[in-house]
Amino acid sequence: MAALAILAQISDPHIMIGPGDIARDEALTAVVQAVVGLAARPDAVLVSGDITDDGEPRAYERAHELLAPLPVPVHVLPGNHDDRAALRARFSAGEGGAGDPVRYSVACGALRLVVCDTTQPGRDDGRLDASALEWLGAELAADPDTPTIVAMHHPPLLTGIAAMDAIGLPAADRAALAEIVAGSPQVRRITVGHAHRTAFGLLGACPVVICPGTHMRVRFEPAGSEIAVEPGPPAFALHVLLPGGDVVTHVQATVPE
């Protein structure tokens, strides 16, 4: 059964410029090489936030260089470690001023990708404020027929990791998003990053996929007060649109050479 569209997702590379940060570059390079080597070429690649660790312009230049081998369009959104203006200066990220929220829609083969910024400058936790919710509702209503993936950085569900959930989306925002998605059956997935591990859940009836980061993995410690990280294999996700309109998501780790 041939796929109608494939969207690859890379998340949380946290690129930095400086001594000792080569592991981040190597991890992102491994994922890019794995995507390039896929037997079926994706229609596009989504990078779902925390492209850099510190929002520095040179780090975006480096990330752009590392992503350059990808032979398909690359769509980005900011994470809590990113700087909107610096991101926009190096990547195409929809319309708006340098510091405005990053919101846009784009066709990825037969899929529609709707990107909604959940970041709050200077903070680690996310928000979907009234402006974001109004934009997202209107954007989904504008095309109710095309199978759609909504992408953001912060998960719209609880992960069961207390320290991570403390910097997620507030309950009221999750509930408001659930109401919008419930009226938009063309949304097949909400896909996010931020949590640095693979996880799945539901927002109402809509599947939510948390894509693992390329570099470090957040350890599953439900009651810890601090986020604990550990090494993990660089990994990425593939969202595949099948005939009939269903979407299946694969999470694939890279194989060390």
Image (cartoon, rainbow, N blue to C red):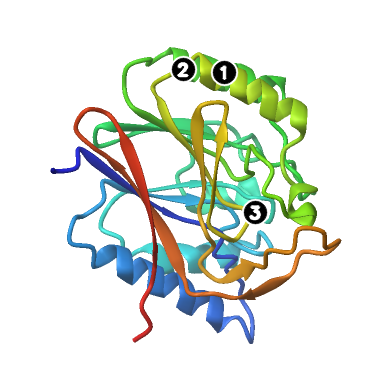
Q: Amino acid at mark 1?
A: Ile
Residue 180, disc: 1
Q: Report the quarter where the C terminus lies.
A: bottom left
- Asked if 86 appears above or below 234 in the picture, the reply is above
Q: Report the quarter where the N terminus lies.
A: top left
- Residue 250 percent location from the top left of the image: 36, 53
Q: Amino acid at mark 2?
A: Ser
Instruction: Tell me if mark 2 has few (under 14), some (14-19) or many (20+) residues whose alpha carbon lies within 10 angstroms of its own.
Output: some
Residue 69 appears in view? no
Task: Specify the quadrant of the image occupied by residue 224.
Answer: bottom right
- Residue 227 percent location from the top left of the image: 76, 64
* Eye-nearest disc, 3 or 2: 2
User: Camera-side residue: 253 or 144?
Assistant: 253
* Residue located farthest toward the right when viewing the structure as drawn: 225
Task: Specify the quadrant of the image occupied by residue 195.
Answer: bottom right
Residue located 26% across and 51% down the image: 42
Instruction: Tell me if mark 3 has few (under 14), some (14-19) or many (20+) residues whose alpha carbon lies within 10 angstroms of its own.
Output: many
Q: Does the CB distance between marks 1 and 2 fall below 8 Å?
A: yes
Task: Specify the quadrant of the image occupied by residue 156.
Answer: top right
Spatial separation of the CA atoms under disc 3 and disc 1 = 27 Å
Spatial separation of the CA atoms under disc 3 and disc 2 = 29 Å
Residue located 33% across and 27% down the image: 147
Spatial separation of the CA atoms under disc 1 and disc 2 = 7 Å
Residue 82, disc: 3
- Residue 181 percent location from the top left of the image: 53, 22
Decide which of tag 3 and tag 2 comes sooner along the chain.
Answer: 3
Residue 40 appears in view? yes
Left or right: 242 in relation to 149:
left
User: Camera-side residue: 101 or 227?
Assistant: 227
Tag 3's secondary structure?
loop
The residue labelled by disc 2 is 184
